[in-house]
Amino acid sequence: MKKIYYILTILLCLYVQTANAQMGVNSTGAVPNAAAMLDVRSSDKGFLMPRMTTTQRNAMPAIADGLMIYNTTTAEIEVYRGLFGWQTASRMGVPFTVTGLTVGGIVQASNTGSGFGMQGNATSGTGVLGISSTGIGLYGQGDQGVIGNGITTGVEGTSGSGTGTFGSSSTFRGVWGRGITTGDGVYGDATSGNAVRGVATTGTGVRGTGSQGVYGDGTTTGVFGTTISGTGVFGRSDSFRGVWGRGINTGDGVYGDATTGKGVYGLASSTGTGVYGNATAGGTGVQGISINGNGGYFQSDSYRGLEATSLSNYAILASNNSATIPVVQFVNLSGGTALELISATAIKITGAIKVAGGSAAPAFKIVSSAGNIIANRIVIPNTTLANNVGDIVIATHNYGGSGPFLNKAYGVFWDGSNWTIYLEDVTAMPVGVTFNVLVIKQ
């Protein structure tokens, strides 16, 4: 009896009205909406649709377009959309024009006008997500191939072994990323491949502008740029660092490899540093290796071409395996100083000193002859570097050859216009005596 009473109570509370094949389900007796075949209203209850797993969903026969279920496997409301199959209802708000199935892709979206082929808007998630096992996750072609604007991630491409995001442009930018505030313009994460790879025929492989123009952090290579005739990696900064490379453990901060050009090229237009290398532990700040060019080349018009500072190791270490080519060469063709050393120990030399330079060499030989002997002395001509009273001149008797040889004391002095070598016993200087002369300028 109680069960019958309970059923009657429910039927009295639930008012169902039908009109023109319409049905309204509510507890107030409201008329169904004119545009609705079924109008269900409640202020304290919801609508519960069929619930099933993905396996159960896929086992349904003859699925009709527009069929809706709640997928308990994905915890999502899904709608069957014919050509597109099952789609999550929460991600169906992207406007697009479908041109049909294409080779290598499921859906192709195009726009022949000036708008978007495909546009994805997301508040905190991903607007458009492309995932590929071996091919290209997301491919865009046009004035701006793929443009993504998001709070967290603009464009995200994930690939198993291919390319996560690939951009190709003939006149503009293949991939352009902009971090408006503190984010990353382009962020690449790779386990073993290239996080960000830029290839250019004549332009710039990878170009970054911002607080950190191009930042690469990888297990093998942080930033890798390849170009045929342009610039592999180009960095420019007005107040910070154009290109900054950091080798945390034993790697190279910035590594440049060039066959005929420049491995690493740094230009400071005002008072900055063209190439700056800092090794905090036992590494190398800047290392230059060249097969037939310049391992390191430094030029400055008004500041320093090269500045090297070390607190515990070598500021500059230069070496080569050539028996004829010098390890380091300093050239100043303007008449100034090629090398200036300021230190408590300015030069420490292990090994021999060899000088060269022809008639302008600081070390040379002079032989006494009828043309340069004046009584007990010979003149060191002004055509050599010994041409100033402030010079330091050192002379030694060369006992090689056939002689004659001196067995008496000799010295060097400035006679008012020339440096001379004289015999202290005031006897005549023999003809054919050879002296080695070293001149140190002040």
Image: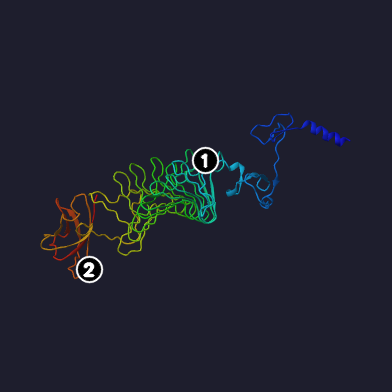
Residue 437 in view (yes/no) = no
Between 101 and 421, the one lying in front of the other is 101
Residue appearing at x 29%, y 43% in the figure:
302
Callout 2 crowding tier (Cα within 10 Å): few <14, some 14–19, many ≥20 = few
Which residue of the protein is positioned furthest toward the front in this rendering?
20
Residue 261 pos. (x, y %): 34, 55
Callout 1 crowding tier (Cα within 10 Å): few <14, some 14–19, many ≥20 = some
Query: For this view, does 162 lie left or right of residue 264?
Result: right
Instruction: Please identify the quadrant where the N terminus is shown.
Output: top right
Residue 335 pos. (x, y %): 22, 49
Name the amino acid, label 1: Gly
The mark tally for this picture is 2
Disc 2 secondary structure class: loop
Relative to 80, say whether 20 is above or below.
Answer: above
Labelled pair 2, 1 in contact (Cβ < 8 Å): no
Between 45 and 38, the one lying in front of the other is 38
Checking the image for residue 224, the label placed there is none
Between 274 and 376, the one lying in front of the other is 274
Query: Which residue is under mark 2?
Result: 400
Foreground mark, 2 or 1?
1
Residue 14 pos. (x, y %): 76, 32
Which residue of the protein is positioned furthest toward the bottom in this rendering?
402
Query: Which residue is under mark 1?
Result: 150
Q: CA distance from mark 2 to mark 1?
A: 84 Å
Query: For this view, does 247 lie left or right of residue 84?
Result: left
Residue 261 in view (yes/no) = yes
Residue 343 pos. (x, y %): 35, 49
